[in-house]
Image: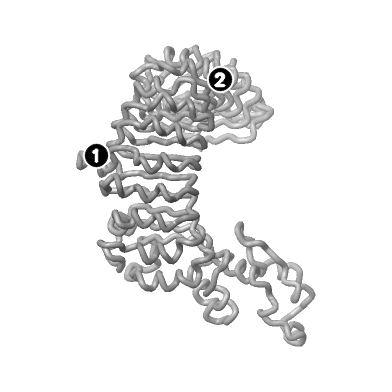
């Protein structure tokens, strides 16, 4: 009987607490349960919610049927519960193609559950021509009014047909909001439309990302300057902006004293970052991926960062001025064509005290000897560079714990790797020319006593 109970017990949910049913813990079969007068009403609400949550992997049908056959389940699901903390409304994720998302039906469903909804995500309305939300006026005003009192996170992705200027101004309803992401925007909103954000004083994480592919095709920009309202949000810890029309960041950004993460990815028109950025003592991560590159680096002097990301930024062409004055633990310069510039670049990086260095896809057919000076390095990514050998200087990286060599052209495993005794992670995925000794593979890899993970396929 114990084995049967284990088989039929609902799987635990990460969000819903697993509670044993005290009324049925000693029951042996259905007959004894009936004799004791034990029914589903004896079960705690949290357990019933957990049973419903555990059916997610078994398809939508069971979750639809259960409330129809049990009054208690139906009553429980018609009101606030932990199940409704996170709601994702994906206009393209429908079980059957003929189903339509009706505005009135959605609002009717949300009303009794609104007090438990903490996170709401709206996705892909732009590519669903069948929904019944209005395409003009204030299509989201009624929905926002329903969920605003309890909502702390709002994400809007690719909803350009319903998230218009009026919807942007309606954001002032969300007085409890701590996270706001608006992604894949194709509208050029008037600057004053963003003024409503200044009233969201609890915001800690904000992302405003234009559809940069759309901007490139139409050679236009949807955001020409950083909205001044953002500078009033002094609780911000994460700020992410993306638009080809964004050319600089005003000095007023220094007022965001709690800012820890600043991402300016895909801002290809960026020309200046204020020197006052160094006054942000809490700043730990700066990302300038897909920018035009430098003289941006001159603006990061004296920064102490956990991570600096410069993917596809042109850093290989513009030098490394300013780096020698920084302290950076994690540097990501992947997808920059360093080639012959690599030795000079590594000389500049040596003073940073790096622990993680990503040179993935940088078209380096050899690894410069200057790598020997990176004594603090723990993670090194040299993947997809067409390497056929590793130089002896790699053996000087005595603290190296993770070495990523995927997508290279090694005919055999570089001997220098055997000297890295602290290595616990090694990636050789897609090294198609590599031959590993098949006669005694176990003893071969036993040369690394701490090695716990090897990826080869």
Rendered location of residue 370, percent (x, y): 49, 12
386 to the left or right of 176: left
Along the viewing direction, whichever of 17 and 439 lies nearer the viewer: 17
Q: Is residue 1 above or below residue 185?
A: below
Question: Residue 74 at x, y = what percent?
Answer: 55, 78
Instruction: Say which residue appears at 26% left-offset and 49% top-offset.
Output: 187
For marks 1 and 2, the one nearer the N-term is 1
**Where residue 226 appears, x then y in whole percent?**
34, 38
Name the one closer to the observer, 431 or 149: 149
Observer able to see residue 434: no
**In the image, what residue occupies the spot 52% across and 15% down?**
351
User: Would you place residue 163 above or below residue 45 in this image?
Assistant: above
Tags 1 and 2 touching, CB below 8 Å: no
The residue indicated by pointer 2 is 353
Give the alpha-carbon distance from disc 1 to disc 2, as whole Å: 38 Å
Label annotation for residue 240: none
For mark 1, give the secondary structure. Answer: helix
Q: How many marks?
A: 2
Mark 2 Cα within 10 Å, few/some/many (few <14, many 20+)?
some
Residue 20 x/y as whole percent: 72, 68
What colouring method underlies this structural image?
A: one colour
What kind of element bears circle 2?
Answer: loop
Q: Which residue is mark 1?
A: 216
Instruction: Give the quadrant of residue 139.
Output: bottom left
From the image, which quarter does the N terminus lie in? bottom right
């Amino acid at each position: 009987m114990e084995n049967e109970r284990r088989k039929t017990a609902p799987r635990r949910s990460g969000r819903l607490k697993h509670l044993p049913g005290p009324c049925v813990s000693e029951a042996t079969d259905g007959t004894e349960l009936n004799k004791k007068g034990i029914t589903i009403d004896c079960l705690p609400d949290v357990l019933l919610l957990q049973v419903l949550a555990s059916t997610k992997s078994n398809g939508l049908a069971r979750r639809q049927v259960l409330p129809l056959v049990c009054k208690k389940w139906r009553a429980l699901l018609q009101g606030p519960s932990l199940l409704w903390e996170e709601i994702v409304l994906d206009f393209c994720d429908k079980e059957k193609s003929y189903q339509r998302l009706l505005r009135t039906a959605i609002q009717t469903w949300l009303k009794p559950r609104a007090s438990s909804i903490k996170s709401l995500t709206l996705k892909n309305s732009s590519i669903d021509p069948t929904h019944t939300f209005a395409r003009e006026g204030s299509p989201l005003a009624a929905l926002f009014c329903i969920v605003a009192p309890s909502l702390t996170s709002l994400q809007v992705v690719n909803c350009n047909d319903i998230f218009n200027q009026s919807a942007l101004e309606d954001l002032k309803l969300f007085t409890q909001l701590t996270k706001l992401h608006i992604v894949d925007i194709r509208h050029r909103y008037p600057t004053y439309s963003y003024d409503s954000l200044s009233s969201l004083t609890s915001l800690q994480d904000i992302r405003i990302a234009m559809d940069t592919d759309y901007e490139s095709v139409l050679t236009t920009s949807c955001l020409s300057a950083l909205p001044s309202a953002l500078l009033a949000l002094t609780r911000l810890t994460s700020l992410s902006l993306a638009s080809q029309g964004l050319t600089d960041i005003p000095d007023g950004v220094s007022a965001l004293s709690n800012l820890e993460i600043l991402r300016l990815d895909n801002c290809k028109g960026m020309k200046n970052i204020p020197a006052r950025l160094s006054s942000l003592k809490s700043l730990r991560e700066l990302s300038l991926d897909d920018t035009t590159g430098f003289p941006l680096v001159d603006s990061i002097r004296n920064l102490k960062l956990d991570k600096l990301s410069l993917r596809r930024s042109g850093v290989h062409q513009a030098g490394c001025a300013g780096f020698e004055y920084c302290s950076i633990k994690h540097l990501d310069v992947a997808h920059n064509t360093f080639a012959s510039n690599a030795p000079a670049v590594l000389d500049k990086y040596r003073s940073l005290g790096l622990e993680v260095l990503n040179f993935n896809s940088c078209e380096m057919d050899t690894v410069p000897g200057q790598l020997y000076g990176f004594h603090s390095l723990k993670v090194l990514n040299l993947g997809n560079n067409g390497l056929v050998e590793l130089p002896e200087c790699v053996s000087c990286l005595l603290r190296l714990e993770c070495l990523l060599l995927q997508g290279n052209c090694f005919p055999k495993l570089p001997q220098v790797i055997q000297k890295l005794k602290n290595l616990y992670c090694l990636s050789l995925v897609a090294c198609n020319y590599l031959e590993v000794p098949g006669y005694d593979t176990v003893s071969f890899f036993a040369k690394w006593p701490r090695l716990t993970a090897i990826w080869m396929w």
